[in-house]
Image (cartoon, helix red, strand yellow):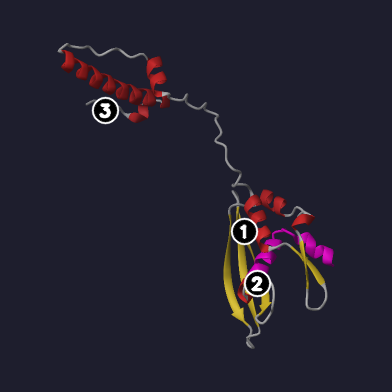
Amino acid sequence: MVFFPMKSLSWESTKLLSAALRLRSLEVVRRESASCAQGVSYSTKRVKKEEILAANEIPAPPPPDYDVPTSGISRPISEILKELNKKVPDSLIRTRQEANGFSIKYIPWHIVNRIMNLHAPEWSGEVRSINYAPDGKSVSVTYRVTLYGTDAEIFRESTGTSWVEEVGGYGDPVQKAEAMAFRRACARFGLGLHLYHEEL
């Protein structure tokens, strides 16, 4: 058996050699079967390069300047922040009534999550701490959001607090506090920050 140094062969030559060996093996098996059945000798047919390419449907090699398309998930931090700082459409904003009678505009955590996935797919989040008040009436959660760009990695942290005995809304007090902390940490990157300015 002859071994060819693969580094010395081009992409097309390597594929061509592989296809030729496969085609030759198939041809030899077919002819040997026929010769055994009929008792005749055979000679191996010389195969042209075009026939090998056609038989194996080998695609043409990519040009040297071929760019592999990406989904745009790796971008500089400045571009990610520019996208996150854009105004969020009014259709995605909700309003809730506070106990003191004031109404507050906010973006639900699941929508914030989708926006982050859209503009900063390479983000990560983690709960840093969960602390109950000494009287046990409230719980605070500290959440960190990290953005990964091609040039840097940055993070922001924020805290959310929820009343343990609060009635209504989704989830338990810790989940509510976490959702608030998550939204606020994202706001530190600029996501939905315009809502805070509107309230001033």
Mark 3–mark 1 distance (CA, rounded to whole Å): 51 Å
Sooner in the amino-acid sequence: mark 3 or mark 2:
3
Mark 1–mark 2 distance (CA, rounded to whole Å): 25 Å
Relative image position of residue 117 (x, y in whole percent): 62, 53
For disc 3, the neighbor class at 10 Å (few under 14, some 14 to 19, many from 20) is few
The furthest residue to the front = 37
Three-letter code for the amino acid on which mark 3 is drawn:
Phe
Sooner in the amino-acid sequence: mark 1 or mark 2:
1
Quarter of the view holding residue 190: bottom right
Quick one: SS at disc 2?
helix
- For disc 1, the marked residue is 154
Q: Nearer the viewer, mark 1 or mark 2?
A: 2
Query: Which disc is residue 140 wearing?
Result: none
Mark 3–mark 2 distance (CA, rounded to whole Å): 65 Å
The furthest residue to the bottom = 135
The residue depicted at 42 percent of the width and 27 percent of the height is: 11
Residue 52 part of the magenta segment: no
Quick one: SS at disc 1?
strand
Q: Which residues are magenta?
A: 178-200
The residue depicted at 36 percent of the width and 26 percent of the height is: 8
Quarter of the view holding residue 23: top left
Sooner in the amino-acid sequence: mark 3 or mark 1:
3
The residue depicted at 62 percent of the width and 75 percent of the height is: 172
Quick check: 115 above or below 188?
above
Quick one: SS at disc 3?
loop
Residues marked 3 and 1 touching at CB (< 8 Å): no
- For disc 3, the marked residue is 3
